[in-house]
Amino acid sequence: MMLRDETLMALGEVIEEGDIVVAVYQSLFDWMEIKPRDLNYVATGAMGQASSHGLGLALANPERKVFVFDGDGSLLMNLGTLATIGEAASENLYHLVFANGTYEVNGGHPVPGGKNIDFASIATACGYPHSFRFSSLRKMQGMLAEIISCKGPVFMALDIEPGKKYPWKYDYIHSSEARDRFRRALNQG
Amino acid sequence: MKSLEYPSGKQIIKQLQMAGVRFVVSLPDIVTSSGLLWPIARNSDFELIRVCKEDEGVSICAAMSYNGTRAVLLMQQTGLMDSLNSIRAIAMDYQLPVVMMVGLQGKEPEPEPEQSSVYGVRIIPSVLEAMSVSYSLIQEPSDALTIQDRIGSCYADSKPHVFLIGRTPIE
């Protein structure tokens, strides 16, 4: 079993200072509390666009690792992104999907397909050279260093359960303050 | 009767190069296919990112802009219409310089877009005006000469702009 907040804490141990993290919805709200940092990219609009922002950042910043913390409902809304990313073959892009089978921040309604969709296999078929699926935090932690040393695009499907819920800070993620903070951090030095 | 003149694909591409555009993000559009997209695909000055849906391109171009990397999203007006929520949220609400070049598929060569007999073409200027999105028409050859400056203004002001391609660019 993988609780989302514990999974994010484990990922926080391997994310380095110069890495970019693009996250969405509850994973974003949790991540902002667990690992507040200037290179958290929080303004992705809506409708499943996080991985497309991640690809743009990865292409424009090849010297940095870019991590996308996607949701299953979000990815289903923009599934073609997997073929786009597979084709673009960004070596610095790490695409993680936190799959809980629901639209959690929109009332907890089930996503089509529930928890049955094998996103890792779809990613492999779309050209990601490395795809993984985990339902155990311990197993993920055991492989994390090796996975992050792989050249991307790398895909990880994480079958998670909600953990502690952190507050929804919509006003902040859509604010010019958040975008300016990221821009300054990206371009400093 | 004066014969119609068509914009030059080479001139448009030159303007993109002079504007410092490095990435072209695109879905194919029959209006711009021969005169723009195929030449861009063969031009090593550009990195072409092929997307599956146009709203991906809005996000890709917007994210690239954070470190000043310049990009253009090349698509058809059907893709523009399909991407309106991304343009609303990412380009307008977030005030990011997303530059779009849009082939008006089905438009007759002579009239302005607003006078087209094709509903899907005729509504485009009104839709953009309703959203307060800046746009300009590339229809006559001289229209292409405005591209470099307009792209520069987009990035200077951190705002989106749509170039509507009103006649098929010649190769």
Image (tube, coloured by chain):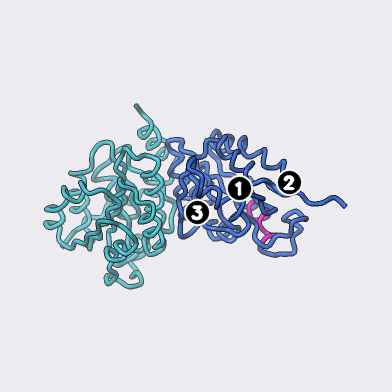
- Give the residue pinned by disc 3: B86
Image point (60%, 53%), residue name: B102
Question: Which numbered dot is residue B140?
Answer: 2
The three-letter code of the residue at mark 3 reads Ser
Chain identifier of the residue bearing label 3 in the image:
B
Q: Which mark is residue A138?
A: none
The span from disc 2 to disc 3 (Cα, nearest Å) is: 30 Å
Q: Nearer the viewer, residue A152 or B55?
A: A152
Q: What element does badge 1 sit on? A: strand
> Do we see residue B26 in this rendering?
yes
Instruction: Tell me residue A1's x, y (percent).
Output: 15, 63
Q: Which residues are the magenta region?
A: B121-128
Three-letter code, disc 2: Glu
Q: Tell me what hue chain B is rendered in.
A: blue
- Of B99 and A74, nearer the camera is B99
Q: Position of residue B125 (x, y in %)?
A: 68, 53
